[in-house]
């Protein structure tokens, strides 16, 4: 028993918009690939044909074909006066990765803010006999104050790099 792929239809404006987006120079390869899949599916090609033509796995072609069909269907069924216009931004949003993928953040925003705030204090204020913070001292003090149970020097360094505040003399030793 063979399954049939979800049929896709694009009107002339949608087709032109997808082709325009595809031609952008700064478009990441993964988005180009997804647009290729949608454009090929709209011509009536089956998933296996698209997969062999572009050197992709069939499940990948199926996934993005279904994702586009679902999003496009919801968009078409919404009230025409309220729905957003078909635009590059909307198309790229539909073809973007879903939220919740990848590794979850280990430290909360509050913990990160406290580590960054700790670096704005002087080590002397925290009972250390040194004049400048090192990553090692920030790690030790973060654990001692109960901000975190465990944290690496590289994580502290990344937190400090991302904050807009400037710590008081942090050495990387």
Image (cartoon, grey):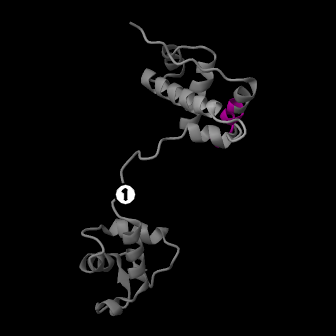
Q: Is residue 28 visible?
A: no
User: 90 above or below 128?
Assistant: above
Residue 7: percent from left, percent from top: 57, 17
Residue 136: percent from left, percent from top: 30, 76
Image point (36%, 71%), residue name: 111
Instruction: Label 1, secondary structure: give it.
Output: loop
User: 172 above or below 57?
Assistant: below
- Asked if residue 19 is among those painted magenta in the image, a careful observer would answer yes
Q: Is 109 displayed left or right of 39 in the figure?
A: left
Image point (28%, 92%), residue name: 127
Q: Disc 1 designates what residue?
A: 105
Image point (70%, 37%), residue name: 86
Residue 59: percent from left, percent from top: 43, 24
Q: Quadrant of residue 34?
A: top right
- Asked if residue 52 is among those painted magenta in the image, a careful observer would answer no
Q: Is 123 displayed left or right of 80 in the figure?
A: left
Q: Which residues are magenta?
A: 18-27
| Quadrant of the rendering where the N terminus is positioned | top left
Q: Quadrant of residue 140?
A: bottom left
| Quadrant of the rendering where the C terminus is positioned | bottom left
């Amino acid at each position: 028993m063979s399954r049939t792929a979800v049929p896709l239809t694009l009107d002339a404006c949608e087709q032109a918009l997808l082709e325009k987006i595809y031609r952008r120079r700064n478009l990441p390869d993964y988005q180009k690939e997804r647009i290729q899949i949608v454009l090929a599916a709209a011509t009536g090609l089956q998933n296996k044909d698209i997969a062999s033509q572009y050197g992709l796995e069939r499940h990948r072609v199926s996934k993005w074909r279904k994702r586009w069909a679902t999003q496009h269907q919801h968009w078409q069924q919404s009230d025409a006066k309220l729905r957003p216009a078909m635009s590059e931004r909307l198309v790229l949003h539909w073809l973007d990765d879903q939220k919740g993928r990848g590794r979850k953040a280990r430290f909360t925003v509050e913990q990160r803010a406290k580590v960054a705030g700790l670096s704005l204090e002087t080590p002397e204020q925290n009972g250390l006999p040194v004049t400048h913070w090192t990553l090692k001292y920030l790690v030790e003090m973060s654990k001692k104050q109960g901000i975190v149970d465990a944290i690496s020097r590289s994580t502290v360094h990344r937190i400090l790099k991302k904050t807009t505040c400037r710590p008081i003399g942090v050495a990387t030793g």
